[in-house]
Image (spheres, coloured by chain):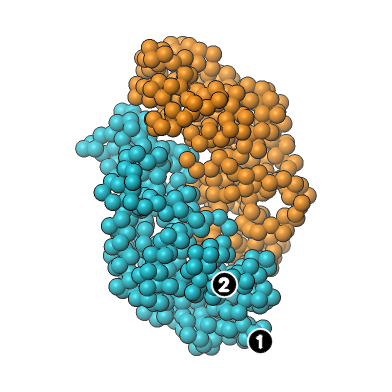
Chain colours: A orange, B cyan
Amino acid sequence: MSAVSDLPTPALCVDAADFEHNLTTMTAALAGPRLRPHVKAHKCTAIARLQAAAGHTSFCAATPREIDDLAAAGLGDDLLLALEVVDAGRLARLARLEARVTVAVDSIATVDAAADAGLREVLVDVDVGLPRCGCRPAESGRIAAHAAQRGLDVRGVMGYEGHAVGLPDRSRRAELCTQAMERLAEAHAVVGGDIVSAGGTGTYDVNTFATEIQAGSYVLMDTAYAQLDIPFRIALGVVATVVSVSDDYAVADCGLKALGMDHGNPEVEGGAVWFCSDEHLTFAPDDDHPVRVGDRVRVVPAHVDPTVAYHERIHLVSDGVVVDVWPVDLRGW
Amino acid sequence: MSAVSDLPTPALCVDAADFEHNLTTMTAALAGPRLRPHVKAHKCTAIARLQAAAGHTSFCAATPREIDDLAAAGLGDDLLLALEVVDAGRLARLARLEARVTVAVDSIATVDAAADAGLREVLVDVDVGLPRCGCRPAESGRIAAHAAQRGLDVRGVMGYEGHAVGLPDRSRRAELCTQAMERLAEAHAVVGGDIVSAGGTGTYDVNTFATEIQAGSYVLMDTAYAQLDIPFRIALGVVATVVSVSDDYAVADCGLKALGMDHGNPEVEGGAVWFCSDEHLTFAPDDDHPVRVGDRVRVVPAHVDPTVAYHERIHLVSDGVVVDVWPVDLRGW
């Protein structure tokens, strides 16, 4: 077991206590199949195994590769590909897996692609207010009927209130979530089925309509979700080395290729971020926290998902010691 | 050889004719060692080989891993690690390579790290106006003297005018570049040496002071650099599949994990980008360019470097056919 201080940097690290807190807090709130963990946030079969051990044996994925590798890892009890795919080769591959695979469909074309590939189960994906995938509620019956006609089992509906999950104001978040679930209920009334799949880390406790919540970020967290009044802790950080120090600022070796930047700059403990370059972070150290070349700093990303996707491995850390290493094995497509 | 239309998506693709144009245009402007190609932009030894074949056999790198793998690929004639590293293990590894390795230093600590590791050659990195690495010109003599005292050969100076390279206005760009090079000249007068290494794609033709230009983006390009009046073409794009179509917008399978986002949204040919999610791009197709589920679209990133770093391979494309596949083998740290 190596010390964090010996890791080559930038190194993606997870605090073991905070991770455990997040895992158990969510399981206490949403037991067993009430949570369908979304693996897109962490992209680690090692973390998925821990979620399964906590009782959550159905998973949600964003790419065919994630489904493939979850199945190969023996986590194929109930896998949902929660976005539309029309690649015939990939869908056929998913159909051949020794796993239960359900795919999201939102059009006649995606139903036909699933049926042609030999897949057996689908959810009708409904537009609940986020302009992304999902059919209008009024179209859901037609799509479900077409799926049934093509021999597919329609297990229910799905709809992601992505426009609500990140809102810090709880009442506004709950209001948009309720409106979204009214649209999903409208579709569910027509489509039927046992599953109403929705939600995310930000709405895990306000979305009481869905039968299962597709949360992923909760287990690692980031600065964006940390602005919400939810009980999850920031477990993830990038450990970086200070490589240059000037009068007003310092530079650490953690840049754009180690951080998802769509939500803006990361935060750095003990300083204020100025900007990121490809392999650098320029920051102003706090007056009470001067740094020297060779010091380590912890950088906390604004958005967990695209951050993790840059890294080959996550180091699980406890009291400055690396206690486990998790390959980020679900990366790529 | 497969058709682009058969590639699983998202697929990073490079147009062969545009790539060749960029390669030859730069070589015509900066022959042989006047260009020190920066591999951080493309992270492919395959592309580095083509740059070497065009006469540029000295390379610039941003990570120890890039240096390692360039050396392993037989491209180790003259490698410059153009950022400061104090990791003793990694530096010692670089010192053992069968390659000529020069590292940037900007402090006593980085000089000592290089000397302790057994490295033999350095450039003094100078702050020329971008608040990142680099010592003040007035400090450069002291650092060079310390390096000499530690037995290191000081080959010259380096300074990156990163605050100038992206400015669309040529006269302003040239003005800031000139000011930056005045600072570098001040350091060079003290430090001496044959090498004055500076510049990038945006200043390749206005920086006439540097003995070598560290350009990387020119060979692939992005929408940010395309705003400049430089003769390089956008060769790089991400081919994506339309997976969902609504009344006002469509969704393609190219999101935050396939795109560097720090420079903002990408562009999509035939449409206007609304926003990106982890694995999705929502866009409004142009009126004269309606799309259907299954159609392919070309997405052009705003920033090449962090885009390429997400992908396992680049497909070289000519007339819709994949004519070569380049592993992005210099990724990670």
- Comparing B45 with B300, the one in front is B45
Q: Which amino acid does label 2 sit on?
A: Glu
Q: How many labels does the image show?
A: 2
Q: Which residue is rendered at x = 42% and y = 80% of the image? A: B211
In the rendered structure, the residue with mark 1 lies on which chain?
B
- Looking at the image, residue B220 sits to the left or right of residue A3; the answer is left
- Comparing B330 with A191, the one in front is B330
**Are labels 2 and 1 assigned to the same chain?**
yes
- Secondary structure under tag 2 reads loop
Q: Is residue B131 visible?
A: no
The quarter holding residue B226 reads: bottom left
Which one is closest to the eye, mark 2 or mark 1? 2
Residue B87's spot in the image, x, y percent?
66, 66
- Looking at the image, residue A303 sits to the left or right of residue A26; the answer is left
Q: Which residue is rendered at x = 62% and y = 76% of the image? A: B119
Q: Which residue is rendered at x = 50% and y = 64% of the image? A: B73
Q: Which residue is rendered at x = 65% and y = 70% of the image? A: B92
Q: Mark 1 points at which residue?
A: B149
The quarter holding residue A149 reads: top left
- Comparing B246 with B5, the one in front is B5
Figure check: A253 above or below A46: below
